Image (cartoon, grey):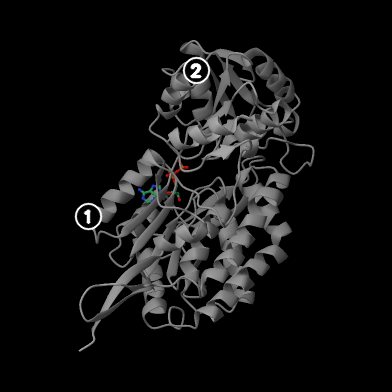
């Protein structure tokens, strides 16, 4: 059912599709395929809640209290939501428990604190005037999210949008809509959110397109592929020029200098690319190794990679679960075969796993290619699977040229004990984040997002609030 105006309703077309567990093929649910008419209804409900409902006008501290309540609700139901996420996405249960649920709850607590603290300014204009700015909500926000961190990425958009007084129409990915729907049930039962503040429409690309081309939507917050981002930008251009924020792909560099802490850097290189089966926009999928340590580091990394267990996502011993779909598996297989054809050296993995608990799903071995060069497809395109491309470098100058020779710029990491080099590199790398001597550093208080074709706008931190507010300048003549 669709969640519109605080109620569960049937889709206008009565069309449903099946959502399955990618690890087992088990049918999990039949979910509506929302049409344009359903999106119209959801947008009207969000518009009504924004224009006439209590939400944007509420004392912001009260709104903050409701956000805290949502955060606590997610914490209270974290076990159940993690299990649902694992079954719907194929990620391991332990990853869902550790990586998806805690930050999904935390972003609500963090944004709750901002609800009454993100203010305008009084500005020193010339002439007999008092000039001040108001930070106002943008209105109806369309949130379109992908399948790799379904609930977490939805919460990264919901929390700041709600904190600033907006109302939302959320479209989860067609492949992983279940945790968002469950969250709506919990909100309905326990959160006291006014009707129409959050609406959820499930469906495919056409459902997303109905949101991005809708004249009643004031802003779209999108996470997904570059191709879809282009379609959304066109839709905005051809409708009401709605604001857009984009968090897209990456081909992120993880750079190891000879003076790196070897043990920690190896572990980070491993999890930087194999966490969540490599289906992570911030995956460290290009590993740059200095030639002095190339062989030694790689051999250590290969030893660790060979110990990874691929299989049943619910088994606590498993490290790598099922890819999200057969389509994603074929994409990974295609890239691996292109890597081989273009002359990269396959060092481990390179095929799917079809034995034991993995017989029914879309499991793929953790795969490492050595001697990758800048021209190869596997050094340039985002694979979104457990495949690592290892590139050798000698000088800092060559390194920077290679690191920045990509259309993407989401995150980056470098490992060195040389403080001057660390800061020098941090300035030179074209990316939204630079992690020094660690990988995957995320916190609600710190901005996350890309440069170049990795998108624009930021998730989390007070920078995100800018995405969900508009500024109004008020002038008063003082007589
Ligand atoms: P992925 O390849 O990771 O699935 P997509 O960009 O295809 O990334 O999908 C991300 C989200 O965008 C999903 O919710 C999907 O349904 C939605 N989507 C796909 N096509 C469109 C479109 N043309 N307009 C708006 N949303 C779309």
Q: Position of residue 349 (x, y in %)?
A: 64, 20
At x 42%, y 78%, the residue is 49
Left or right of residue 338: residue 94: right
At x 43%, y 65%, the residue is 169
Q: Position of residue 374 (x, y in %)?
A: 44, 19
Secondary structure category for the residue under label 1 = helix
In the rendered image, the quadrant that contains the C terminus is bottom left
Label 2, ligand 1: CB separation under 8 Å: no
Tell me the distance, in whole angstroms, between the alpha carbons under discs 1 and 2: 47 Å
Where residue 167 sits, quadrant-wise, is bottom left
Q: How many marks?
A: 2
Where residue 350 sits, quadrant-wise, is top right
Q: Few, some or many C-alpha atoms within 10 Å of disc 2 (few <14, some 14-19, many ≥20)?
A: few
Residue 45 makes an appearance in the image: yes
Secondary structure category for the residue under label 2 = loop
Lower sequence index among marks 1 and 2: 1
Q: Nearer the viewer, residue 109 or 249?
A: 109
Q: Position of residue 5 (x, y in %)?
A: 46, 75
Which label belongs to residue 253?
none
Q: Position of residue 79 (x, y in %)?
A: 73, 57
Most extreme residue toward the bottom, as rendered?
479
Which label belongs to residue 238?
1
Which is in the foreground here, disc 1 or disc 2?
2
Where residue 26 sits, quadrant-wise, is top right
Which label belongs to residue 395?
2
């Amino acid at each position: 059912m669709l969640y519109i105006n605080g109620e569960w309703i049937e889709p206008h077309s009565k069309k449903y599709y099946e959502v399955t567990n990618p690890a087992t093929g088990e049918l999990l649910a039949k979910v509506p395929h929302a049409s344009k008419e359903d999106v119209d209804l959801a947008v009207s409900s969000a518009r009504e809640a924004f224009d006439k409902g209590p939400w944007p006008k509420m004392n912001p501290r009260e709104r903050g209290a409701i956000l805290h309540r949502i955060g606590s609700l997610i914490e209270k139901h974290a076990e159940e939501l993690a299990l649902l996420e694992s079954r719907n996405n194929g990620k391991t249960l332990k990853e869902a428990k550790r990586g998806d649920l805690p930050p999904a709850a935390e972003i609500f607590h963090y944004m709750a604190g901002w609800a009454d603290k993100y203010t305008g300014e009084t500005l020193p204009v010339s002439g007999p005037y008092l000039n001040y700015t108001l930070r106002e909500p943008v209105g109806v926000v369309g949130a379109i999210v992908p399948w790799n961190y379904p609930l977490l990425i939805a919460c990264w958009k919901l929390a700041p949008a709600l904190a600033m007084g907006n109302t939302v129409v959320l479209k989860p990915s067609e492949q992983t809509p279940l945790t968002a729907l469950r969250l709506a049930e919990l909100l309905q039962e326990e959160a006291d959110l006014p009707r129409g503040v959050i609406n959820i429409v499930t469906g495919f690309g056409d459902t997303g397109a109905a949101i991005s081309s809708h004249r009643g939507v004031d802003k779209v917050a999108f996470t997904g592929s570059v191709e879809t981002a282009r379609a959304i930008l066109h839709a905005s251009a051809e409708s009401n020029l709605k604001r857009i924020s984009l968090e897209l792909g990456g081909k992120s560099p993880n750079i190891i200098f000879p003076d790196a802490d070897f043990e920690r850097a190896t572990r980070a290189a491993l999890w930087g690319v194999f966490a969540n089966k490599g289906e992570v926009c911030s995956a460290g999928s290009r590993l740059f190794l200095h030639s002095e340590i190339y062989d030694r580091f790689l051999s250590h990394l290969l030893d660790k990679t060979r110990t990874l267990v691929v299989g049943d996502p619910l088994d606590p011993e498993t490290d790598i679960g099922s890819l999200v779909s057969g389509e994603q598996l074929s994409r990974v297989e295609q890239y691996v075969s292109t890597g081989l054809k273009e002359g990269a050296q396959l060092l481990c993995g390179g095929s799917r796993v079809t034995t034991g608990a993995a017989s029914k799903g879309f499991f793929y071995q953790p795969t490492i290619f050595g001697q990758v060069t800048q021209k190869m497809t596997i050094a340039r395109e985002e694979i979104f699977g457990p495949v690592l491309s290892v590139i050798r470098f000698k000088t800092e100058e060559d390194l920077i040229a290679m690191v920045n020779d990509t259309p993407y710029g989401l995150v980056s990491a470098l490992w060195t004990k040389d403080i001057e080099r660390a800061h020098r590199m941090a300035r030179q790398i074209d990316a939204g984040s630079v992690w020094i001597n660690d990988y995957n550093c995320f916190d609600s208080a710190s901005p996350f997002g890309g440069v170049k074709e990795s998108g624009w706008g930021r998730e989390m931190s007070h920078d995100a609030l800018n995405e969900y507010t508009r500024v109004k300048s008020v002038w008063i003549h003082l007589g």
